[in-house]
Amino acid sequence: MRHTFPLLLATTLLSTPLMAQDDLRAAALEAFKPLPSTVPAVADNPITPEKIELGKALFFDPRLSASGVFSCYSCHNLATGGDDNLETSIGHGWQKGPRNAPTVLNSVLNEAQFWDGRAADLAEQAKGPVQAGVEMANTPDNVVATLSSMPGYVAMFSAAFDGAAPNFDDMARAIEAFEATLVTPAPFDAWLNGDDAALNADQLAGMQLFMDKGCVACHEGINVGGHGYYPFGLIEKPGAEILPVGDKGRFAVTETADDEYVFRAAPLRNVSVTAPYFHSGKVWDLKVAVQIMAESQLGEALSDQEADQLVAFLDSLTGEVPAVTVPSLPAETGNTPRPTAEVLTAPE
Amino acid sequence: MRHTFPLLLATTLLSTPLMAQDDLRAAALEAFKPLPSTVPAVADNPITPEKIELGKALFFDPRLSASGVFSCYSCHNLATGGDDNLETSIGHGWQKGPRNAPTVLNSVLNEAQFWDGRAADLAEQAKGPVQAGVEMANTPDNVVATLSSMPGYVAMFSAAFDGAAPNFDDMARAIEAFEATLVTPAPFDAWLNGDDAALNADQLAGMQLFMDKGCVACHEGINVGGHGYYPFGLIEKPGAEILPVGDKGRFAVTETADDEYVFRAAPLRNVSVTAPYFHSGKVWDLKVAVQIMAESQLGEALSDQEADQLVAFLDSLTGEVPAVTVPSLPAETGNTPRPTAEVLTAPE
């Protein structure tokens, strides 16, 4: 759904330069929510240890790609913030993807997936890159043939899905189950949970600015964004180097004129470690990204100190990635389809 | 060094169809050696926890490549036997490497590195792919600039190398230290260490055949290979589809006519999970690979049962990969060189 803008929210929050922590926390808890202490539940996909184990194997398995080069992990690298730190990802045949890869961390808590929200959930999302010609360039049939050729996968699917043989839908559900475990509690959560010492003065001032200036109007909730769709350039469109004219965002999903250059508000958890920024991936400096946002979305020219404090607040959203041990994947058999580096579709 | 062939060894080992386990073990311990229970020592590079931690970070870091796409882990994937399960690796610009990527597992125990032994140790080896135009396509200067731009790496280098700033040599030493931890105790080791139940009858028969037929002449020692250089096609050269005429192996290192088509004997630990086989990566089926070896190196046509038993023995070399937790890498800064997908050198 499209949100209306609670533009008045900010003015009601702040009356003094720095609120008392308890008051600031009370205001923050109206806008945000700390991460849960357990794996978030997922609609229509009960999370079980067997699904998580299978999903982890699939997430790390480059044999989901036609070339055998790319796994989910390649572009959603758990060592580098759950993304690939590239402008846009490089995939099959050295083709460049159209948009910056979002982080997989905490993505289970987004309202919908992809920059334009075209996938309702992570299970639907997981099917996209596997088949995209510029990403993993595979087909569901070939993926199922690959997984079915390995007794280890057959056993894991059976254990996770009540005796089922490997299939594309359950592959996606298992990946969703593993990804649901990738939540990253941060100093921000510790502070929301009552630990006054978790944030320093700059971070607190930044949080107050975040609410005062109105950033929170779009970047709210448990993921500090990831909910609702908004035009990029609400007040003033950024230049075409940042907002390329050819990518009309959610318009491609809804075909509604109102949705031209509309994108899902980026979830901001771990934003400090997931440069470069925006769907175009054109901005590497978080402070610059904050300044662009303030101008384009709020019509605000931030002072240098304000920008620094906002960045300090965003730093407090960098969380701890759960310990993930590299799985040992089943070995290929004589029936496993062989990888091919051939590029069958022309680059877009 | 070039080994001479102890061709008489086999005949002295076997007098009965299946030796008593104790006799077989005594013979096997003449030829092989179980893995150590601690991290192997490395010449001129004392292993410390700080070096291992830094090396692990570097091993997983795609920013060692010019494109930001490839890390050591990409082609030496710990989830798939320490290699990439490709004929030859795909690297920068979607170029194909010249030879099959060997497993990193237990590689610290090889006499030298690469198929032609051109690197004396893993530290020397690690510098190769980082700079190879068809692999990571980076330069030492750019790597050092990248690492020096991140305070997290500066601190890790300092801790690991007595206050040193990031530099290319220590990068390689740290990677070697991490790789030294990647040893994989297998049922084969348990049996060598005295556990009669660790191997089944087929595996024992296969081990006896391995020694009897003379496979052990080249594939001996702690890594069941990885020591000494031998002509591929000693008795009968395999076809050009398996032994391409353009790749003369160790000849390129020594420029000695005797070394044409000479390669380091492949270490066979984890061979069951590291298809495809040979330096050309042209054979996917281990049984076929075993048959080719028997014919080309020993002039032996194996019976079907013999080939199956040899494969069963090789399966017993599949070990347990140590638990490796994905590291959280330092984030880029404003000074970090940006990735480039551009291909500066023409494919070879």
Image: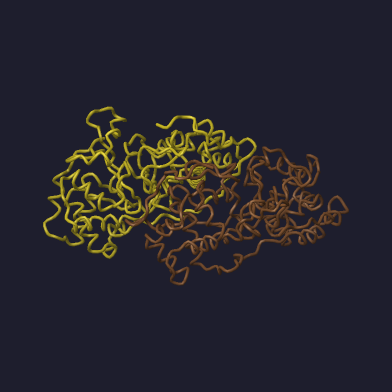
Chain colours: A brown, B yellow
Q: Position of residue B297 (x, y in %)?
A: 19, 43
Of all residues, the one furthest to the left in this rendering is B15
Question: Left of A290 or right of it: where is A326?
Answer: left
Residue B256 lies, with reference to residue B56, above or below; the image says above
Please name the residue shown 28% across and 54% down the image: B314
Q: Residue A145: in sight, yes or no?
A: yes
Is residue B228 visible to us here? no
- Splitting the image into 4 quarters, where does residue A36 fall? bottom right
Q: Quadrant of the C terminus of chain B?
A: top left
Tally of marks: 0
A63 left or right of B20 in image: right
Q: Seen in the image, is B194 located left or right of residue A219?
A: left
State the residue in front, B162 or A99: A99
Residue A192 at x, y percent in the picture: 73, 60
The residue at 80%/49% (across/down) is: A209
Q: Quadrant of the N terminus of chain B?
A: top left
In front of the other: B175 or A321: A321
- In percent of width and height, residue B236 lies at 18, 40
| Residue at the image point whose x is 61% and y is 65% from the top | A40
In the picture shown, does residue B79 fall above or below B254?
below
Farthest right residue?
Answer: A15
